[in-house]
Image (tube, rainbow, N blue to C red):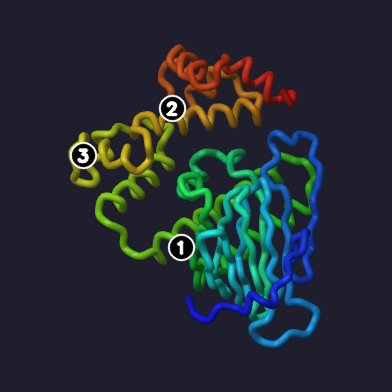
Amino acid sequence: MGVSPDWSRCCWPKKRNKGVSEKRSRKMENKETQVIDSIERFKPHTFSFERGEGLFMSHSHDCDELTLILEGQGYYSSPEQNIKVSAGDVVLIPPRLHHGFVCTVPWQGISVHFRHDRLPVHSRYPFGAAEREPNRILHARLEGEELRWAESSLSQLEREWRADDGGSDGRQLMRLALETTLLLFRRGRSCGAPSAAGDRSVVQEVLKEIHARYYAGITIGELAARHFLSESHLRKKFTEAMGLSPKQYIINLRLMEAKRLLQQTDQAIESISSEVGFTSSSRFYELFVKSAGMTPLEWRNAHRHGG
């Protein structure tokens, strides 16, 4: 991990502040559909300090955090981790995880606080690991064109968020910019991680395929054949890793996306059922009621009016 900073000289303020930060929180008319909570750029500290000193900021928040380091060095910590970061590193921090950071070489970067459960489900693959390990910070490394792409995407996201004209075009651009950055994070995490054991690696690849094609007529046999496995072997390994079968995982993704569309759009329920991959409306209603305890219309009315 390298030389750790001198924690005896750390401070523990109540408010989070990465040096000189530009934070802006805003209220939107429909908080139930708000994806971005805040965006901040952080710059080198304005006070003088010797190499190896810094401010250790400890805190937690109810939303996800994605931070891209553009310059400098420091550490991110959780109760189980101490991760050294520098230019090109991206960290993804789950909600409610108590964590901290310290700047050891003056740094710059950009942080986005957002709600991943309000994104389309095809964008949520990176959060599967966070949900299985809610006490760990996820980390990826970007370089070259991919680093510039991520920085450009986050800059576009910031511009649209600060403009906040309320138009659908702006919201779509923000969503696409955040999704692009998350995809780059996913790729950087895959490329930078040590080689996993065969079964675990296969499960991760299958998860990616499911998130990309959950709405299509994807079958366990098709997934197994792509990885030269029997259906029973894939089903067993997937269930051991995820705690539920591939079939149930796909159903859960479809229901999650249906709930997002019910809450965020005015699409007809029949149209939503078809869009997320159900070929039978009656089957969709049956599974939805079993999962949510109410019909899709009742769920839409309750969650669009703050119920």
Q: Residue furthest front?
A: 8
The answer to whether mark 1 and mark 3 are in CB contact below 8 A is no
x, y percent for residue 1: 47, 75
Q: Residue furthest bottom?
A: 50
231 with respect to 34 (left or right): left
Indicate the secondary structure of the residue bearing disc 1: helix
Q: CA distance from mark 3 to mark 2?
A: 25 Å
**Residue sitting at 31 percent across and 53 percent down?**
201
Q: CA distance from mark 1 to mark 3?
A: 29 Å
130 with respect to 62 (left or right): left
The answer to whether mark 3 and mark 2 are in CB contact below 8 A is no
**Residue sitting at 73 percent across and 65 percent down?**
12
* Mark closer to the observer (1, 3): 3
The answer to whether one can see residue 153 in this image is no
**Displayed quadrant of residue 220:** top left
Disc nearer the start of the sequence (3/2): 3
* Mark closer to the observer (3, 2): 3
Indicate the secondary structure of the residue bearing disc 3: helix
**Residue sitting at 57 percent across and 69 percent down?**
148
The answer to which of 66 and 258 lies nearer the viewer is: 66
The answer to which of 222 and 125 lies nearer the viewer is: 125
x, y percent for residue 131: 50, 44
Amino acid, disc 3? His
- The residue pinned by badge 1 equals 188
Amino acid, disc 2? Gly
- The residue pinned by badge 3 equals 233
- The residue pinned by badge 2 equals 277
Q: Which mark is residue 158?
A: none
| Mark 3 closeness class: few <14, some 14–19, many ≥20 residues within 10 Å | few
